Amino acid sequence: MKNPFAIGHKLFYTKAVEEADKASFETGEVHAVYSTFALGRDAEWSCRLFVLEMKEQDEEGIGTYLTIKHHSPALIGQQVEFIASLKAVNGNEIIASFEAKIGDRLIASGETGQKIIKKERLEKLFNSLHD
């Protein structure tokens, strides 16, 4: 694992809200806006951008947690900018916070944890879980 970043470094990701991002469950559509769970997926991706630059070829990142606070709705077609900030690096664990905004309006905020682990170790772990 390498670390080319200083604490506080920011990375950016822009996402256009799509129909597939709506708040829908097995019982049907709840709201035609950016769902909290889709926001969480994209927030994790924005923070994973650090992992992509930090992992070696024989390593992979794996999520350890995600917290998200949904502040304001985003409509289908709107562009949401994610600002990921490197908060801490503890050994092989990367902690990043994020904000999701449309212009100056805060859509969501939160934090993610991801660990960088050797691919071989992950494969052994996943294989040990088979029945």
Image (cartoon, rainbow, N blue to C red):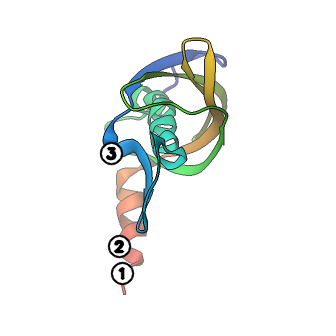
Binning the other alpha carbons within 10 Å of mark 1 as few (below 14), some (14 to 19) or many (20 upward) gives few
Query: Whole-percent x and y of residue 56?
Result: 38, 35
Decide if residue 98 is in sight here: no
Residue at image location 61% in from the left, 12% down from the top: 104
Q: Which residue is mark 1?
A: 130
Quarter holding residue 13: top left
Query: Whole-percent x and y of residue 78?
Result: 41, 23
Q: Are marks 2 and 1 in contact (CB under 8 Å)?
A: yes
Amino acid marked by disc 1: His
Residues under labels 2 and 1: Cα distance? 6 Å
Residues under labels 3 and 1: Cα distance? 31 Å
Q: Which residue is mark 2?
A: 127
Amino acid marked by disc 2: Asn
Amino acid marked by disc 3: Ala
Residue at image location 36% in from the left, 26% down from the top: 77
Decide if residue 18 is in sight here: yes
